[in-house]
Image (tube, rainbow, N blue to C red):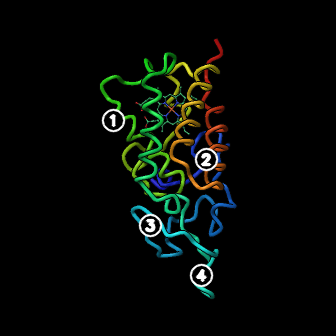
């Protein structure tokens, strides 16, 4: 059971780690927000002037998910991505024609969980085991390049703050490489 709640390192290869610099309060297994009590704002997080709350307050340790504005931001990102995927000649046919909303929900909740947000994905779907879940689909190097191009374009569109934007792009590059499962 515990396994379903694990944060980070969610692909079997264990190659994808939560970036330490963006999460000063703990490693991948730190319980979400338990050490801060800070509630994530639904949207429009206030910009922070220092890494402390107030002059002598605790170090700010809220999650990347919260810093990015929570669910609303992830929803915009994933919708921007799937809008492109639906039109892609290599990728579109792999996705369930009748369930684009489901696909949006799965990727959005997965990303939210990965970046420290709610663990809804694993509560509903179990351990991500992404390589295994992608096995039925022909993830060739070409498909990977198409997938990545759309994700980078979606990131261009949502304009995350620079540090998180760089971390997100780094993450998807590594994760997409790990997902390739066919070479012809
Ligand atoms: C490299 C190219 C990739 C291709 C061609 C690809 C393709 C697909 C397809 C066809 C699905 C099924 C759609 C659905 O019903 O949800 C899927 C699901 C999913 N993909 Fe990918 N994917 C790729 C990379 C990635 C990467 C890099 C990630 C994460 C960083 C990812 C995360 C997911 C997730 C979370 C699901 C839903 C799994 C589930 O719960 O069933 N994918 N992908």
Rendered image quadrant of residue 55: bottom right
Identified at 46% across, 59% down, the residue is 69
Rendered image quadrant of residue 144: top right
- Find the residue positioned furthest to the left: 98
Q: Earlier in the sequence, mark 2 or mark 4?
A: 4
Write down the residue under mark 4. Answer: 58
Label 3 Cα neighbours within 10 Å, binned few <14 / some 14-19 / many ≥20 = some
- As drawn, 55 above or below 154: below
- As drawn, 98 above or below 77: above
Compared across the picture, whether 35 is left or right of 175 comes to left
Q: Secondary structure at mark 2?
A: helix
Compared across the picture, whether 165 is left or right of 89 comes to right
Q: Is 73 in front, or is 59?
A: 73
Write down the residue under mark 2. Answer: 168
Q: CA distance from mark 3 to mark 4?
A: 16 Å
Q: Is 87 in front, or is 3?
A: 87
Label 2 Cα neighbours within 10 Å, binned few <14 / some 14-19 / many ≥20 = some
Rendered image quadrant of residue 82: top left
Q: CA distance from mark 2 to mark 1?
A: 23 Å
Identified at 61% across, 74% down, the residue is 49
Q: Secondary structure at mark 3?
A: loop
Number of the label disc, if any, that sits on residue 101:
1
Q: CA distance from mark 4 to mark 1?
A: 40 Å
Write down the residue under mark 3. Answer: 40
- Find the residue positioned furthest to the top: 184
Q: Is 86 in front, or is 144?
A: 86
Residue 23 position within the rendered picture, expressed as x and y whole percent measured from the top left = 63, 63
């Amino acid at each position: 059971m515990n396994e379903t709640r694990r944060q980070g390192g969610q692909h079997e290869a264990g190659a994808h780690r939560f970036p330490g610099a963006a999460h000063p309060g703990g490693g991948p297994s730190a319980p979400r927000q338990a050490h801060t009590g800070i509630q994530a704002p639904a949207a429009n997080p206030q910009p922070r002037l220092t890494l402390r709350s107030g002059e002598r307050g605790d170090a700010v340790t809220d999650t990347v998910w919260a810093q990015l504005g929570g669910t609303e931001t992830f929803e915009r990102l994933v919708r921007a991505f799937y809008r492109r995927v639906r039109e892609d000649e290599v990728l579109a046919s792999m996705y369930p024609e009748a369930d684009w909303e489901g696909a949006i929900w799965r990727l959005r909740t997965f990303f939210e969980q990965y970046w420290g947000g709610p663990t809804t994905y694993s509560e509903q779907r179990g351990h991500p085991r992404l390589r295994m879940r992608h096995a039925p689909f022909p993830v060739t190097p070409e498909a990977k390049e198409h997938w990545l191009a759309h994700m980078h374009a979606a990131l261009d569109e949502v304009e995350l703050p620079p540090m998180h934007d760089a971390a997100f792009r780094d993450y998807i590059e590594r994760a997409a490489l790990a997902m390739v499962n066919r070479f012809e």
